[in-house]
Amino acid sequence: MTVWPKIEEGRAAQALEEVGEKLDSAVGEVVLDFSSVRKIDTSAVQAMERLARIGEEKGVKVVLSGVNVQVHKVLTLLRLKSRFWFVN
């Protein structure tokens, strides 16, 4: 399991892109701390779609930690929720 630094709300898309680039070196699963993210914008959603795709291609489980209700609802509405694992 690999745990990466906390994802900050103001730079979520950039941080997710950086994580996607590092997935080649990940084994098993990666845990991303979303406890500081209150909402996600379209660029963050696009980055999450790419991250999910890369994780699936590499066989790496992407775990989101500390996701709040609003972000969880957005992921559900966009049908992205099933592509991630969640922990509190």
Image (tube, rainbow, N blue to C red):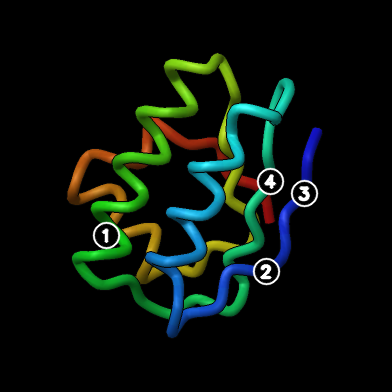
Q: Given the image, on which type of amino acid does mark 1 rest?
A: Val
Q: Given the image, on which type of amino acid does mark 2 rest?
A: Lys
Residue 32 located left or right of residue 41: right
Residue at image position (51%, 64%) is 15
Residue at image position (50%, 69%) is 68
Q: Badge 2: few (under 14), some or many (20 or more) residues near its Cα, within 10 Å?
A: some
Q: Nearer the viewer, mark 1 or mark 2?
A: 2
Which is nearer the eye, 70 or 54?
Answer: 54
User: Which of the image's four quarters has the N terminus?
Assistant: top right
- Decide which of tag 1 and tag 4 comes sooner along the chain: 4
Badge 3 vs badge 1, beta-carbon distance below 8 Å: no
User: Which of the image's four quarters has the C terminus?
Assistant: bottom right
- Decide which of tag 1 and tag 2 comes sooner along the chain: 2
Residue at image position (42%, 28%) is 54
Q: Badge 1: few (under 14), some or many (20 or more) residues near its Cα, within 10 Å?
A: some
* Pointer 2 residue: 6
Badge 3 vs badge 2, beta-carbon distance below 8 Å: no
- Structural distance between the alpha carbons of marks 4 and 2: 10 Å
Q: Badge 4: few (under 14), some or many (20 or more) residues near its Cα, within 10 Å?
A: some
* Pointer 1 residue: 74
- Structural distance between the alpha carbons of marks 4 and 3: 5 Å
Q: Given the image, on which type of amino acid does mark 4 rest?
A: Val
Above/below status of 71 relative to 26? below
- Structural distance between the alpha carbons of marks 1 and 4: 19 Å
Q: Position of residue 32 (x, y in %)?
A: 63, 53
Which is nearer the eye, 81 or 47?
Answer: 47
- Structural distance between the alpha carbons of marks 3 and 2: 9 Å
* Pointer 4 residue: 31
Badge 4 vs badge 3, beta-carbon distance below 8 Å: yes
